[in-house]
Image: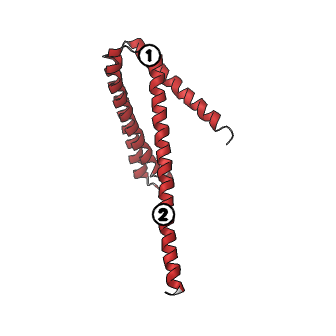
Amino acid sequence: MTILNKNHQFNSQNRISFTVVLFLLFSVSLFAQKIDREKIKALKIAHITEKLDFTKTEAQKFWPIYNANENAENELREKSMTRRKEKKAENLSESEAKTLLLDMEKTEIQKTDLNSKYLKELLSILPAKKIIKLYQAEHSFRKKMFEEYKKRHSND
């Protein structure tokens, strides 16, 4: 075997090893993010449960509605972010920019419709005061998370 062939084999093996290591690091990163999301979700559920003091019946009816709404909101948010990220304003023609704006408006209307539907569903199972407490609990949770984030990243 010539030196050229040995170097070629070595480079191929290095590429494979590098690809495997890169894949593992990427997988660990995604797994850590998923754990963080799951942990945050669990903390949020605990926070809301503590603040609202559900009856057993309320909790059984509330969480499926809440989770379905969260999933729908996340889908709209993801769709909106993806659309905006893939398009840079300076690269758009005027008609493409107008189409993007109209799509953004459509997404906002969908969010409003989703919120209206969610409120109607909540009113069918919870007293209005508890729904106000829910909105306050969600706000206080976001505030806690933001404060925690600031505290952890204040040295950056």
Q: Which residue position holds label 1?
A: 52
Q: Which residue does the image show at 41% across and 14% down from the upper left?
A: 130
Residue closest to the far front: 1
Choose the circle earlier in sequence order: 1 or 2. Answer: 2
* Mark 2: amino acid: Thr
The residue nearer to you, when weighing 130 against 47, is 47
Residue under label 2, please give it: 19
Cα distance, mark 1 to mark 2? 49 Å
**Helix, strand or loop at mark 1:** helix
What x and y, as percent, mark residue 32? 50, 44
Q: Nearer the viewer, residue 19 or 83?
A: 19
Q: Nearer the viewer, residue 94 or 61?
A: 61
Q: Secondary structure at mark 2?
A: helix
Mark toward the viewer: 1 or 2: 2
- Identify the image quadrant of residue 135: top left
Q: Residue at x 54, y 85 (%)?
A: 3
